[in-house]
Amino acid sequence: MRYELYYWPSIPGRGEFVRLALEDAGADYVDVARERGKDAGVPALIALMEAKSARPPYAPPILKAGKLVLAQTANILLYLGGRLGLAPANEAGRLWANQLQLTFADFVDEAHDTHHPIASALYYEDQREEAKRRSALFLKNRVPKFLGYFERALSDGGGPYLAGRRATYPDLSLFHVVAGLNYAFPNALAREMKKHPKVAALGQRVAERPRLKSYLASPRRLPFNEQGVFRHYPELDAPR
Amino acid sequence: MRYELYYWPSIPGRGEFVRLALEDAGADYVDVARERGKDAGVPALIALMEAKSARPPYAPPILKAGKLVLAQTANILLYLGGRLGLAPANEAGRLWANQLQLTFADFVDEAHDTHHPIASALYYEDQREEAKRRSALFLKNRVPKFLGYFERALSDGGGPYLAGRRATYPDLSLFHVVAGLNYAFPNALAREMKKHPKVAALGQRVAERPRLKSYLASPRRLPFNEQGVFRHYPELDAPR
């Protein structure tokens, strides 16, 4: 099966959660909107979103797997997890993996809204004061709460991975969330990660997985930037 | 199987999506935090959240099903859907139901943030000006986009339900999202629903399902209020 991923070509964004799973598994896939030529690029993404369908996608990322067209990051990973060998074996484990992925989604939405607290349709510059207020409270209350929760899951679950002894897709996702937060809020994260050593160790372990290590060093890995979910605006970070 | 739902007892909130499915199916369940006595009430909810577990919940709603403890609304419904006879029959259909539920979750998060654009930890009164700005843009851009998407799915899918001829849990959820928006923004919704007749008709059809009709008229159905996700602050609504 050759999978087709459709996502904005200039940002890691939410598509990166899907890319990490495909890359880690060494899956056969095409990152369609980053390819050139016929039936590729952003026009192919737009065409897929606008195509008449009984099950239309609301927004990217979108995965095509044969005739199946799936949207919503956690839903795509729910589908791919078992097929890529990156999900727990039984139903209870798979529900746990899905539950974690949904909690990452909530965390990521909140991280996005630090720079867009009023509306995605407005420029950052038009909501900068509100962004400062939201970011300060995000770093004070929300980051410790979310990271503390994942630390607790790793600790009480026995680790070293979120679902036990074997890596599953939520581990790759947690790595990406921490990488994104580190990019956006380096000062705050440097302090915060000291308090969450198991989360930090998990991130390092994920980054050293052979296929991911090679992916992360390749041009396929898009750099974080100020168009995506995780943006670095120094004025939103904690003081050094 | 007697299910146990754990959710804040004074608001419909996100727990309501789970309640609607349980009620529509006539399932045997206890709404634990709304019961009195030993092992009930909010203390039982707190105890469950704080219990040492390899798979801890991050936040309510939480469902106990035998030994299984599940959190995240969409994850709970993924589990319950098939068991309650409220999910499509095959995998592609179930992924579609899950995809819809995740899109409701995004919509509901945005609806929540209209009154709390800066932080959940602050009072509404401490972010009222930001809330006015966010609400105006939510009503102008986001409500039409989300409702238009569900209208399109009902139209292109052939309806009358989101997954075809038979009602599934996303139909109950869409009913609740529309009910919540109607409570929060009655003026804006009165105009908006005229543009989305299939969504409106679906909501009416769901409300008339015999078990739900009886539930909605019962004291088990909590009224919307200004502690929950959907809050009515007249200054945030469109003019009459």
Image: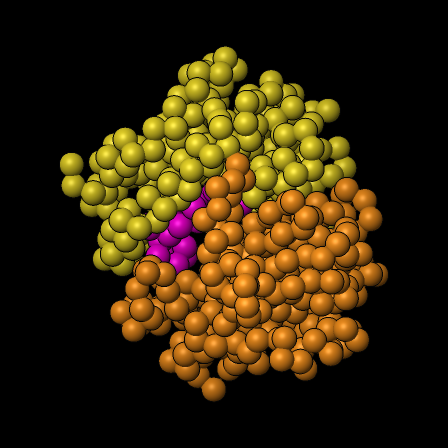
Chain colours: A yellow, B orange
Q: Main secondary structure of the magenta part?
A: helix
Per the image, is A110 magenta? yes
- Across and down, in percent, residue B139 comes to 47, 70
Please count the marks in the image. 0
Q: Quadrant of the N terminus of chain B?
A: bottom right
- Across and down, in percent, residue B233 comes to 41, 79
Tell which of B101 and B134 is nearer to you.
B101
- Residue found 48% across the figure and 67% down from its top: B229
- Residue found 74% across the figure and 47% down from its top: B94
Q: Is residue B215 left or right of residue A125?
A: right
Q: Is residue B79 above or below residue B116?
A: above
- Residue found 45% across the figure and 49% down from its top: B50
Q: Is residue A73 visible?
A: no
- Residue found 66% across the figure and 38% down from its top: A92
The span picked out in magenta is A101-122
- Across and down, in percent, residue A33 comes to 56, 33
Tell which of B127 and A51 is nearer to you.
B127
Per the image, is A199 magenta? no
Q: Is residue B79 left or right of residue B120?
A: right
Q: Can you name the residue that lies furthest to the left here?
A: A240
Q: Can you name the residue that lies furthest to the bottom here?
A: B240
Tell which of A14 and B42 is nearer to you.
B42
Q: Is residue B186 visible?
A: yes
Tell which of A51 and B124 is nearer to you.
B124
Q: Is residue B83 above or below residue B134?
A: above
Q: Is residue B152 above or below residue B228?
A: above
Residue A38 position by quadrant: top right
- Across and down, in percent, residue B33 comes to 54, 65
